[in-house]
Amino acid sequence: FPINVPVVFIATRSDDLVHYNCTYNLACQLAGTRKNKEASPIYFIELDNAKHAECTFTDQIDQETYQAALHTIYKKHGLPYIQ
């Protein structure tokens, strides 16, 4: 996987399709391979109540967390974002 590509993992503790720990462990393993200074970061967004693939519309708190985290990442990488 190219080290110059930032990666965002999104996991929810209520996911019954892809277990939270699987996503977390994968993110940690990939982050562990990016030790040099040229590597782009690995981000992990943790949600609590949304189901798989529903993080943007089922739980209000998760929706706000998801949007705030993504727009913070967008801002950091010089992409259009919402304050």
Image (cartoon, helix red, strand yellow):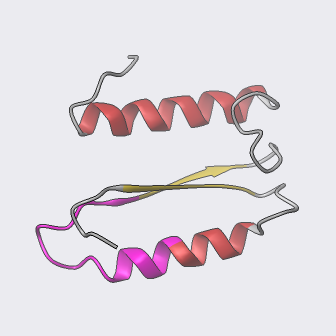
Q: Position of residue 66 (x, y in %)?
A: 58, 36
The residue depicted at 15 percent of the width and 77 percent of the height is 36
Q: Position of residue 5 (x, y in %)?
A: 28, 58
- What quarter of the picture does the C terminus occupy? top left
Whether 31 is among the magenta residues is: yes
Task: Please state the extent of the stretch shown in magenta in the rendering.
Answer: 27-42
Locate residue 78 relative to residue 70 in the image: left or right. left
Relative to 78, say whether 83 is above or below: above
The residue depicted at 50 percent of the width and 30 percent of the height is 68
The residue lying toward the viewer, choosing from 2 and 10, is 2
The residue depicted at 69 percent of the width and 31 percent of the height is 56
Relative to 24, say whether 9 is above or below: above
Locate residue 15 relative to residue 69 in the image: left or right. right
The residue depicted at 24 percent of the width and 39 percent of the height is 77
Q: Position of residue 71 (x, y in %)?
A: 41, 30
- What quarter of the picture does the N terminus occupy? bottom left
Relative to 82, say whether 11 is above or below: below
Whether 30 is among the magenta residues is: yes
The residue sitting at the front extreme is 1
Relative to 40, say whether 3 is above or below: below
Q: How many marks?
A: 0
The residue lying toward the viewer, choosing from 53 and 75, is 53
The residue sitting at the top extreme is 83
Location of residue 12 by image quarter: bottom right
